[in-house]
Image: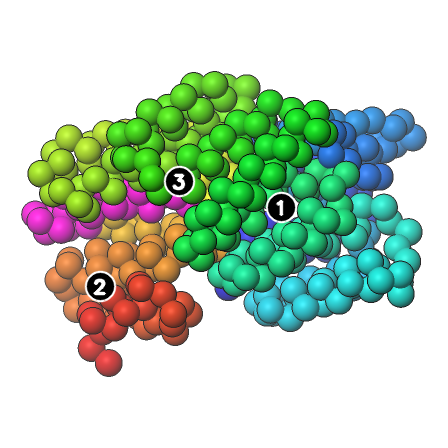
Amino acid sequence: MRTFALITGLVMAAAPSFADTIHTAGGKSIADVTVLSEGLDKVLYKDGRTERSIDAQNVISVVFTDKPRAMMEADGFLLDGDLGSAAIVLDDYVGAILAGAEKERKKWAPANAAWRVVELRQALGDLPGVVSAATRVIDNYADTRYLPGAYLAKADAFYWNEEGPKAQSTLKNFETAITAKGMSERWRMECDLALILTNDGLSATARRTALSGVSGRAGSAFATVKNRALVAQGESFLSEVVVSADKAAQNVPAALKVFETVLKDPKADDATLSGAYVGMGDCLFHSAAKSLDKDELKKAALAYLRVAAVYPEQSRYVAKALFYGGRSLDLMGDDENQDRAQKLYAEVYFTFPESNWAREAKNFSRR
């Protein structure tokens, strides 16, 4: 699978000019500039001959075009869909820089490459690899805009590897860094949100109350944080339905409303949008699976499969999306859709062989 953000960068790199593009949290882009550095507080760039800056907290991504050789080599592997080899190339490049065996004239490149390794390990579902790569960013690039993301990625990987206490400890360290480095309120809210999401001691109701507090504080000023909190609220509603089916009549419509709210707002990252589409699919599937309403099953399948098609790097959601996309098509009953479902089941257990969804998929496979 190819990481969408990285492939986008490759497409931009094919352009004849060597101008960089900065994508902002407000949904706008600053194009045809040359990025000089990506600090913890500011991203510096040249617009023509004029040096300018933008708050780092408002930068979602930067697409670089004039890259070091190793980064271009990694891009080549990405074009072939080989995320593992791309990660190894970038890993070696960062290692050589840190060991002093190689020098880099582009100030932004080593930290960017180190962060890309984190993203690639996330896309591969390599949780120990995420922890290792994120730790390297924290230890060596603490003055760059990648520091907050590294703390959050490390905590997230610990949590999904069933190491909740380590996740909480990592986030407590992040809290300390936020205060020590005078980071913006956005990162304090991100940390508060992560502390809620990695705390399994909270009941569903208590979790939603805490999430509501974060989304309220974030408001329109930090819409990406607000929307991530909203998706978590929707997922909390659905988690109660799994435990107690009698909550479905109230919780499923409430969850659907939350997911629809997020999807109407473009100010959300890929992980948030993936969660919202899977959540919407879950709501639609829950009702349609009982009535076997083909129109609703089709809507559910489209919501699920959008995640697999548009956000393939979101490994946490893709396996589930493929499985339930298959179930939605299977329940439609006609031969064509059932054949499509079988292909999706096969993709789940070949691509995600160690996941619970792979085991579920095999139960419905005719092979």
Decide: is 205 above or below 112: above
**In this view of the protein, which residue sits in the foreground, 100 or 21?**
100
Task: Quadrant for residue 309, please give it.
Answer: bottom left
Residue 70, percent across and down?
78, 64
Res. 187 in view: yes
Residue marked by disc 1: 150
Asked whether disc 2 touches disc 3, contact meaning CB atoms under 8 Å apart, the reply is no
Q: Which residue is drawn at 54% across and 24% down?
A: 222
**Mark 3 Cα-neighbour bin, 10 Å: few <14, some 14–19, many ≥20:** some
Task: Quadrant for residue 22, please give it.
Answer: top right
Asked whether disc 2 touches disc 1, contact meaning CB atoms under 8 Å apart, the reply is no
As shown in the figure, which amino acid type bears the numbered disc 1? Answer: Ala
Circle 1 — which element?
A: helix
Residue 121, percent across and down?
57, 60
- Tell me, yes or no, whether the highlighted magenta stretch contains residue 78: no
As shown in the figure, which amino acid type bears the numbered disc 3? Answer: Asn
Residue marked by disc 2: 337
Residue marked by disc 3: 199
Mark before the other along the chain sequence, 3 or 1: 1
Residue 128, percent across and down?
54, 61
**Mark 1 Cα-neighbour bin, 10 Å: few <14, some 14–19, many ≥20:** many
